Amino acid sequence: MRNSWVRLIREALQSGDGTLRLVFLMGAGVVTAAACVALLIAARAGGLL
């Protein structure tokens, strides 16, 4: 599963399509932000913060 994502991202970066590259970068940023928020919520719920 992860290898297919890496291959898709690599192909998008190698192709000259700047729009596709921007979409992938935005998607990665959204996923990263969601993961950080989920970790913060879990830590606060667990009493770590």
Image (tube, grey):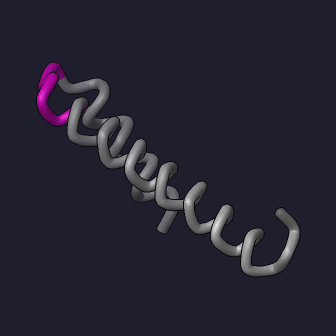
| Residue located 15% across and 23% down the image | 18
Q: Per the image, is 22 magenta?
A: no
- In which image quadrant can residue 24 be found? top left
Image position of 9 (left or right of 42): left
**Residue 33, above or below 26:** below
Image spot of residue 33 (x, y percent): 49, 50
Q: Per the image, is 19 magenta?
A: yes
| Residue located 20% across and 26% down the image | 15
Q: Which residues are magenta?
A: 16-21
Image position of 8 (left or right of 22): right
Viewer-nearest residue: 20 or 4: 20
Q: Name the dominant secondary structure of the magenta segment.
A: helix
Image position of 13 (left or right of 34): left
- The total number of labels drawn is 0
Residue positioned most to the bottom: 46
| Residue located 24% across and 31% down the image | 21
- In which image quadrant can residue 20 be found? top left
| Residue located 87% across and 68% down the image | 48
Viewer-nearest residue: 8 or 46: 46
Residue positioned most to the right: 48
**Residue 8, above or below 47:** above
Q: Quadrant of the C terminus?
A: bottom right
